[in-house]
Amino acid sequence: MSEIGYGAWGIGESAWVGATEDESVRALHRAIDLGVNFVDTARGYGESERIVGRAVRERSGDEVRVATKVPPKNRVWPAPEGLDPAEAFPGEHIRSSLETSLRTSGLDHFDVLQFHVWSDDWLGRGDWLETIAELKQEGKSACSASPSTTTSPTAHSPWCAAAPWTVCRSLTTFFDQAPADALLPACAEHGVGVIVRVALRERTRTPACRRRARHRPHRARPPDARSGRRQRPTWRAWRSGFLAPQSP
């Protein structure tokens, strides 16, 4: 698997705006041409699963591995303290979400099935573990993953040893290197893979962006064509207050 993956949140035409579908597909093809063979998407990323599936099917001979995420049934990010796992990830919801993702993407399986939120209190509770095992046995997912929410350095090794994950998703950026101190060594000790997310902090640490001296006010997006409701300002609007693309 390539060390660099393609994060497909931004191409979903939901929270991020600007790219057309054809541009996104060209970008995916270009990434694969350059050796990237891991793409991360999610049920909650708008049209991302469909667009990723389109590109991956067009590159059927390249063995591109795709990860997706199951959103919590209660649609609450992050998981509030004390939440019962049956409210966030009951087995029937996990199965329904994955099957919807498969239909949407046109793929026959996902290489990694992730929970989009997690609480360490859920270990040993609920029927989610049995459902994950069944989906793996049915060939619909190859392995499972969860975000690491453990904050105590001494708790990382027990968490990796006790959890049924084959992959851990970790927030590791230029600004926060804490996982390298304890989480990454613990994952290596227990044979758990690591997906490092937003390493470049949603592109804000790349040469394509620079600081702005003048604040650009947030603007709400126009009403959604399907629901008629006005949408909240996007992440792109939030970033635009202090960042802007560099001129060529």
Image (tube, grey):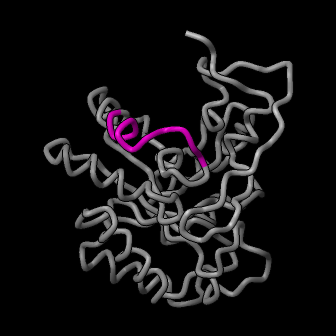
Q: Does the magenta stretch include residue 95?
A: no
Of residue 176 and residue 202, the one placed in the foreground of this image is 202
User: Residue visible at 30% across and 71% down?
Assistant: 103
Which residue sits furthest top?
248
- The picture places residue 95, in percent across and down from the top left corner, at 40, 82
The answer to whether residue 188 of the structure is visible from this angle is no
- The picture places residue 208, in percent across and down from the top left corner, at 59, 20
Quarter in which the C terminus is drawn:
top right
Quarter in which the N terminus is drawn:
top left
Q: In terms of image quadrants, where is residue 50?
A: bottom left
Of residue 178 and residue 79, the one placed in the foreground of this image is 79
| Count of picture labels | 0
User: Residue visible at 25% across and 79% down?
Assistant: 138
User: Residue visible at 43% across and 41% down?
Assistant: 20
Write the start and end of the magenta stretch as one range: 16-26
- The picture places residue 213, in percent across and down from the top left corner, at 85, 18
Which residue sits furthest left?
61
User: Residue visible at 76% across and 57% down?
Assistant: 151
Of residue 213 and residue 222, the one placed in the foreground of this image is 222
The answer to whether residue 147 of the structure is visible from this angle is yes
Q: Does the magenta stretch include residue 17?
A: yes
Is 198 situated above or below 127?
above
Is 62 situated above or below 96?
above
Q: In terms of image quadrants, where is residue 160?
A: bottom right
